[in-house]
Image: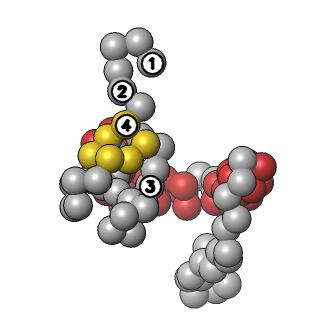
Amino acid sequence: MPGGSTKKTCPFCQNILFCAQKICAHCLKEQPKKLRLEKKLKRFDEKREDWVSGRKKNHNIASIKDEAIVLLEKLHAIGFKPASWQGDQEEGGQM
C-alpha cells in the first residue's frame, strides 16, 4: 500500500499484527472494531425503532430475510462458516 502500512499493533499486548488479523496470535484477544463500523452501528441503533416499524408496515420482512440468506452464502463463499442462525418470533408466528 503506497503511504500506508500492512501491520498494526495489538492494543492489549503491543504485539505486531497484520492489519487483517481479527484476533491477536500472542494474547488471543479479539481486536477492536474499526471506527467506521462502530459509527454505522451507532447510527442504526438511533433509528432502530423507526426502521423496524417501517419494515413491518410495508411488509418488507421477507425481503430482509432473503438478503440475510444471500449474505450468509457470500460469507460461506469467502471462507466463513456460520454455525447457526436462530431468530425470535413475535406472537402469531411471524417475525
CB within 8 Å, label 3 to label 4: no
- Circle on res. 1: 1
What is the spatial separation of the Cα atoms under label 2 and label 4, in whole angstroms? 5 Å
Q: Residue at x 77, y 49 (%)?
A: 77
Question: Dot 1: within a 10 Å radius of its alpha carbon, few (fewer than 14), some, or many (20 or more) residues?
Answer: few
> Nearer the N terminus, badge 3 or badge 4?
4
Q: Residue at x 34, y 13 (%)?
A: 3
- Circle on res. 5: 2
| Residue 80 located left or right of residue 2 | right
| Residue 21 located left or right of residue 95 | left
| Residue 64 located left or right of residue 55 | right
CB within 8 Å, label 3 to label 2: no
Question: Dot 3: within a 10 Å radius of its alpha carbon, few (fewer than 14), some, or many (20 or more) residues?
Answer: some
CB within 8 Å, label 2 to label 1: yes
> Nearer the N terminus, badge 1 or badge 3?
1
What is the spatial separation of the Cα atoms under label 3 and label 2, in whole angstroms? 16 Å
Element assignment for label 1? loop
| Residue 42 located left or right of residue 75 | left
Q: Looking at the picture, which amino acid does disc 4 mark?
A: Lys
What is the spatial separation of the Cα atoms under label 3 and label 4, in whole angstroms? 12 Å
> Nearer the N terminus, badge 1 or badge 4?
1
Q: Residue at x 45, y 18 (%)?
A: 1
Residue under numbered circle 4: 7
Q: Looking at the picture, which amino acid does disc 2 mark?
A: Ser
- Circle on res. 41: none
Element assignment for label 3? loop
Mark nearer the viewer, 3 or 2: 2
